[in-house]
Amino acid sequence: MKSSAPGKIILFGEHAVVYNRPALAVPVNQVQVDVEILDSDSAGVWIHAPIIDLHAELSTLQPDHAIGSVILKVLSLLDTSPSSTNIQINISSTIPVASGLGSGAAVSVALIRALSSFFSNPLTDNQINELVFEIEKLHHGTPSGIDNTVITFNKPVYFIKGQPIETFTVGKPFTIVIADTGIPAPTKESVGDVRRLWLKDNNKFENIFNEIAQISLIARRSIESGKPELLGDLMDHNHSLLQQLTVSSPELDKLVLSARDAGALGAKLSGGGRGGNMIALVNQAEASQVAESLIKAGAKNTIITEIK
Ligand code: MEV
């Protein structure tokens, strides 16, 4: 049994989305997690995840182990006792860890999908989404749920916390360059810091969140009506508001500036910030030129993706 799940980027609205403002996110299918489940001759549940150098039997892992705890949760939901199960779980991934591309949520989605199908009890996308949200809460404190939603449904989403999922259509395809600072994005920390600042200066932060909400709304309209070129200015504006939220960093700012210098129509950090990825809107013909400039400016990796 094999299952996979894509990476994701947030186009607009990160952080504000935690405070019930809308945000836009899209799957990134150039990177993905693959999970394979096989019957095994060895006793127990054996996990092989070379990306994190994990080769272990489930019962030898701490109960709160990031991958082990997901497997335990799913097996218990499926009424399957781990001690009487002989399987091998192979996990591979091309999504960089802690880069803001949703690697953790993607591992959970692919694992739950593969395990539930293997035990002939495939869960629906809604069930998977809810379960992964519970897992995200254990690791990230107060997540909005946008990451698990876009990754589970593998569709562009216009997301408002607690509301039924809404997808959006892309009137005219557009190209995004994603660049990784190579610095781990401490999402839990940046979300916590924004919360502390919001508690201290409620008015100021509510106003910033409202401005970001406006940007997400206009961005959705521009995308749906086939005017993606309007997204450049919106990205620049969203980035400056994220700077005010204190979640940018010198490395992210440097990549954002160099993308603009190299001809991008706009650029911003994407995800939790402080590290992780930034994104730039480009004309398709200039995508490689912008990607090369980003590498020269210190990016560890770039991905060119077409949003359609
Ligand atoms: C992380 O990908 C996006 C944040 O808005 C946190 C969240 O929505 O849970 C920073």
Image (cartoon, grey):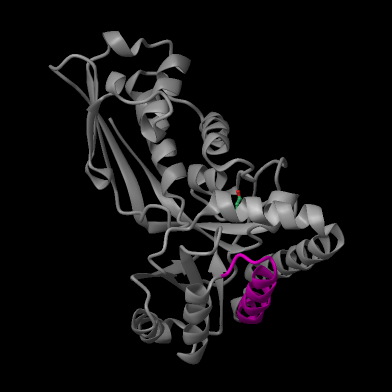
Residue 174 in sight from this viewpoint: no
**Residue 78, relative to residue 180: is it above or below?**
above
Image quarter (top left, top right, bottom left or bottom right) of the N terminus: top left
| Rendered location of residue 287, percent (x, y) | 40, 81
Q: Is residue 167 magenta?
A: no
| Rendered location of residue 127, percent (x, y) | 55, 29
Residue at horizontal 66%, vertical 76%?
240
Q: Nearer the viewer, residue 13 or 37?
A: 13
Q: Nearer the viewer, residue 77 or 253?
A: 253
Q: Nearer the viewer, residue 172 or 291?
A: 291
Image quarter of residue 129: top right
Helix, strand or loop: magenta stretch: helix
| Rendered location of residue 57, percent (x, y) | 24, 23
**Residue 232, relative to residue 66: is it above or below?**
below
The single residue placed furthest to the left in the displayed view is 41
**Magenta-highlighted residues:** 230-248
Residue 89 is left or right of residue 304, and the answer is left
Q: How many marks?
A: 0
**Residue 53, relative to residue 175: is it above or below?**
above
Residue 168 is left or right of residue 279, and the answer is right
Residue at horizontal 69%, vertical 50%?
18
Image quarter of residue 117: top left
Residue 279 is left or right of residue 82, and the answer is right
| Rendered location of residue 68, percent (x, y) | 36, 28
Residue at horizontal 72%, vertical 42%?
163
Residue 3 in sight from this viewpoint: yes
